[in-house]
Amino acid sequence: MIFLLLVPHLILLSGPDLISAAAAVLIYLAGGLFVSHYEKTHSPKAVFQFHYPVITTSITLGLGALFYLRWQHFAFFSSWESLPQMPAKRICGIFCAGLVILALFGSDRLVSIIASMINGDEDGSDSKHETVFIGICSAVMMTLASKCSPFYAFNDWVDPHTMFTVGKSILHGMLPYRDVYEQKGPLLLLWHSLGALISFDTLHGMWVLEIVSCFFFLLFAYKIMRMRLGTGALPLVPVLALIVYTAVSFDQGDSAEEYCLPLLTYALWIGYHRIKKGFLPKPKEWILIGVTSGCVLWMKYSMLGFYLGWTIAMYLFARVKKQRIELFKGIGLVAAGAAITTLPVLLWFAFAGGLKDLFEVYFYQNIFMYPKTADIYGRFAIFSNLFSGFLNMLVFSTLISITSIIGIFWCKGNENKNIFRLVHWSFVVMYLIIYFSGRFYSYYPLIFGVFALFGLMAVVDIIERRLRSGLLQYFESNMMTAVSLCACVFGIFFFAGNMRSLAFEKEDYPQYQAKALIEASSIENPTLLNYNFLDMGVNTVAGLLPNQRFFCGFNLPLKDIDIEQNACIQNGCTDYVLTFMRTIESPHYELVGKFPATYNLAGIRPTYNLYIRR
């Protein structure tokens, strides 16, 4: 039924003009009559199952009309400085994609079935309307918070584009590390290959995958909160999403930490659930812990400290229950599950002849070369690094840090001893392994959002016990849940740093200006070298594939990068060269474009230079 409502969006995407708008209105009216007739002839359903298409239709029609008017009367609306200039096509595209997502969550019980299979029993499972609400929340949060979504003209963070270029290269038969260089894990690069299958010249495919990742993170977090607070925990789901996805550490979206959040939260759910029941995990749960930890291993292994702390807590629990034998059997099953993830990766590189490159780059260079700018051997250096890591958390994930710390202390006094050990050891060991080396990028602390849910549980528990407000009885209503989601949507507009980018259109970005010049040339299958800096996104928006191993610069003190890139400049091995705040001297290249960036850096506006081969 809901797929009928996609038709007017497709019409608006192809226009808009008055005829298209009239056709869209007629289709909406017909769809509304059909929905009304359906509801009269069928038994009433929960509000988040079959009533939401009617609400979505009304909201979409109203917003579509508003932005259609803004399209037709641009000069009038451009005087409203508080409103960012967003063309109607992009807005209509967003709602089109949103309706697709809602249809996926509302038309069947697929996600609930998956959740039930993971649980292994009915305890802690979710009703359909709760699962649908979490899906809606995930779609809304990722659409507004992540710059990979169609809501934004462009994501100008370098890491997503570097990984995306390698992901596209994999689809064309290139092997990571050997043919195209990257430092990130092979599963993370394959994840970007999947995004490239959805959209080859934008990061919209990664936005879809972000929604999936966000959904499972919030789903498992809700399961934990529900065991303590009951179904009244549902309104806390948008609050948790707001805390995590408006953090500075979320940056612009599409980081390894973001995709590992649901994997770690699943392990936390299994541990919390089983300890609450007084048993060790079931065999298939041990195996799934191994599969998910294997995924973390091949995405970004620095977060494996979580699983080490998790295992310590489970050992202490098994010792109390005198179930050490069962624990060791479970650890064996974890190893088997990790092998399920690991063997395909090793076989892939072994048959392709790149096993040596995999271990040299992903393990050796990341461990022994990546942290060389930090002092990890000096006297008291590790203690200094750990203290700086704590400051890194407070600065870039302030709410995550505060709620996590509150939650840990709350667990100590309000949960049983084994639950506290689970949360405490998982947090501490992961913190030690991430920060001991002395590297402090802004996106590192995002992964600690796994523990923020305990802080929310603490706040609600304190209100319930100290104020005796009966707060949870109001949480059980659908109205309170909807209000929570709406409040958090407004919260994104106030707290998310990405909102300032809504004022920009594609034409404002140097990447799209460079794309226009490249497409205007007669060069077939052009190639580009990002000289001495990371992939800024021209490869993405222009649909380019690299022909050099070091197609861009990397944050590694590796001499081969400079040697091969300089040789490429001198030999003219690519059709184009893009530089950032620097010029090049080569008989093979001439300057064809200078593009000022859309931001200031140290008081100046940096410039991109595009060179073409003579």
Image (cartoon, rainbow, N blue to C red):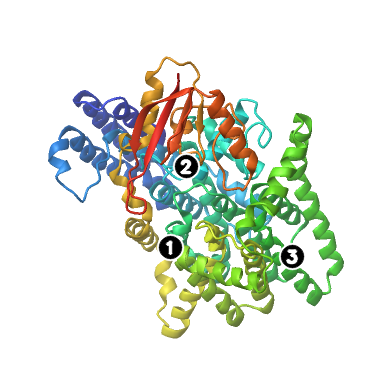
Type of residue at label 3? Answer: Thr
Left/right of residue 531 with respect to residue 436 in the rendered view: left
Question: Disc 1 on helix, strand or loop?
Answer: helix
Residue on which the image places disc 3: 311
Residue 364 in sight: yes
Q: Is label 2 in a helix, a strand or a loop?
A: helix
Work out whether 414 lies above or below 549: below
Could you tell me which secondary element the residue under label 3 belongs to? helix
Q: Give the residue drawn at x 77%, y 39%.
A: 356
> Would you name the residue on which mark 2 appears?
207
Q: Work out which quarter of the rendered image holds the C terminus and state it.
A: top left
Report crowding for label 1: few under 14, some 14 to 19, many 20 or more residues within 10 A (C-alpha): some
Q: Is residue 416 left or right of residue 469?
A: right
Q: Amino acid at mark 2?
A: Trp
| Residue ID for mark 1 | 239
* Disc 1 residue type (three-letter): Val
Real-space Cα separation, disc 2 to disc 3, in angstroms: 33 Å
Asked if 286 appears above or below 349 in the picture, the reply is below
